[in-house]
Amino acid sequence: MNPRQRPSLTLLRLLAAAPMLLSPLSARADDDKKPPAEAPVQQVEIKGAAATYDARRNDTATKIVVTQEEILKNGDTTIAEVLKRLPGITVGGVQGRGGDIRMRGLGSGYTQIMLNGEPAPPGFSLDSLSPDMIERIEVMRAATAEYSTQAIAGGINIVLKKAIVTAQRELKLGLQDDNGHVGTNTNFQLSDRRGALSYAVGGGITYGKFDRPSEVVTTGFAPDGSQNLLRRTAIQSRGLFEALNLSPRVNVNLGPNDIVTSQSFVNVNRFHADNSEQVATVQGAAPRYTGTRIHIDSDFEMLRSDLTWTRKLAGGAKLELKGGVNYNHRQTEAPSSQYYPGDVLALSRLITSASTDQGWSSTGKYSTPLFEGHALAAGWDAGYSARDEDRIQRESSTVGAPAANLDQRYNADVKRLALYAQDEWTLTQQWSMYFGLRWEGIDTTSEGNDYAPVSNKSSVFSPLFQTLWKLPGSKADQLRLGLTRTYKAPGVNSLIPRRFASNNNSATSPDQTGNPLLKPELAWGLDLAFEHYLAGGGLLTASTFVRRIEDITHQQVALINGLYVSRPVNDGIANTRGIELEAKLPLRAMMKGMPAVDLRANVSRNWSDLTSVPGPNNRLDQQTPVSGTVGADWKLDTLPLTVGGSFSFQSGGPVRISLQQSAYTIPKRSLDLYGLWKFNPKNQLRVALANALHQDNYSESSYADASGTLRDGTITPTTAVVRALVEMKF
């Protein structure tokens, strides 16, 4: 059987088997349909102001809010899969495998990821969060003073479930097929209320296997253009992963004006992999090592816990205080073997590493309607994190290969403090303004046994302005304008001058090190948007943005003592700009007699250039030039069935990284489909096909100087993934 046919056949089998697998649920649905003995009771639905408030439409500060219903609609298992369908957001890396989250085509710290309004703690990964644990996702195109202004491209705030309205018992059992590898996904929600006390516990268990082959083709060219090198490296990665996450929360109502909330997040991961590389040299000199085999065992545990006290004060004022602690630990053991040509064992290596991050955070916010039409707020955001890491390397050789034993130990402390004030001023029913001021400082220190102590301090004062104008004579049209001062601080790993060696050092596979002299990147930004709202939640929007970034950071490769070394440097100014278009069209709400189909589409076009890098194609951070998504959801009238899908596109092309370095990626296309069958209000089956096109991914990096050109091209096949999820409420 052709392996490319397997996902479609598996999907058909799951749908065909659904009635038999879920016959008890169907029987229960039939029982629910029997007429009751008593006369029917008229039902009245009451919606409060909170349920009808549209934050995207009415908040002065621009914000896209993704509800839990939208998050869960496609049966996604990771947050990255949810985010890639939103306007202006793309996911780096290989299709279907996650990657860095990018807004306006920019990642690498330009996009701020927050958890419950605070910067994500060290070691946190979006992949560790199950979509079922999330209440909503807030996408902020322009920074506000309340949240960190380390958001040049924008910010994404992941809000875990907090509100506990009624008792809930929910269980979701999932099964998936990834190119013949079966995985499971189980999630549960348990919540209840007892007088002044309410509680909820959410969690999930994930298990999966993977088999990910790829090939790297290395070519070299002399200065006259003649080819002098051709190597093919076959790479194989097989393994499995297991994950457990829990999110308990407790709300205690101390009185009419006081609420205390405890919320925690626990994540445990186990990862095992066997990786291999085999180099075949067709033309030119072979590398020192032509074979590598590595076994990896990695264990990770993470805990984050917050305690929040909210007190309502006289005159509509409110005080909110929150304190939190976080801890994570990673233990990794990786024995490996390096081989000379002819599969001769050259070097045996064992690397064991352990890292621990622990810290605390504190936030406070006081808000009050001090003057008529003004909503004033002021507060602080402080945090401290300490990282300790050991890396022990032991090497041995029976044939005289170079061997080195290393004992590397280091620690790093990061202290941050921010103070802010903001005012949202409603001048008229059509016009409101937002003013914010935020000062944020970061102090990073580090010591290690193989480098000199590092100290790096930076602070930024950010004035912020946004305004919303609802056009006179129209209830549907409005304009937004934003002016922001944002920044990007260098991360700890970018500052520490530890050297990480490459097995086969080359210009396209250099050693890596940090730079303790890095400065923060500073940016001025302008955002402008027009919004037209339609009946039933539909909308048409057009927005544009401009950013001017000083002291831009990029990777610089240099030949030092006979080895190529890559390190980050501040160099020049970057200018980036773009436009975004979005449409949501609920057909039935807009036109009577139409089917219950919701259409959605968005497209983004981004441009950027660096003054320190000659053109053409001197884009910032390998920025995605064009991205877009089209999708539809259809709720059938004659069956309890909803079907839908979305197609996403990201352009690629050549990028000039520096005078010598270039990169290239092909356009990426992704198609996701889903179907939802409701047996009754409490039981349903969701089937999804992710990455249905399973397009092969290709990326390329090259280095050119007076001695010639070296180019690495990586071909990575991808697979379609079929998922089935049974959702039950009790």
Image: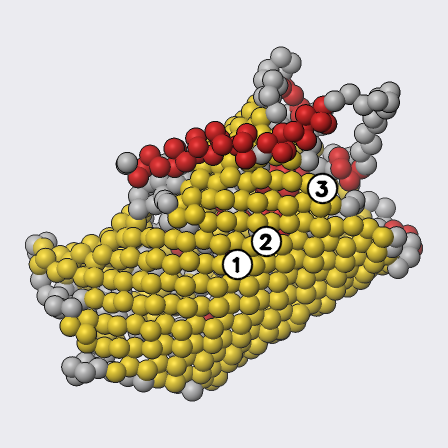
Say which of 22 and 272 sits in front: 22
Residue tagged 1: 243
Residue tagged 3: 730
Distance Cα–Cα, label 2 vs label 3: 17 Å
Q: Amino acid at mark 1?
A: Ala
Is residue 379 shown left or right of residue 13?
right
Determine whether 308 is above or below 155 in the image: below
Q: Quadrant of the C terminus?
A: top right
Say what secondary structure mark 3 lies in: loop
Distance Cα–Cα, label 1 vs label 2: 8 Å
- Residue drawn at x 51%, y 79% as measured from the top left: 388
Residue 472 percent location from the top left of the image: 71, 27
Residue 386 percent location from the top left of the image: 57, 76
Q: CB of mark 2 within 8 Å of CB of mark 3?
A: no
Say which of 603 and 170 sits in front: 170
Distance Cα–Cα, label 1 vs label 3: 25 Å
Q: CB of mark 1 within 8 Å of CB of mark 3?
A: no
Q: Amino acid at mark 2?
A: Gly
Residue tagged 2: 204
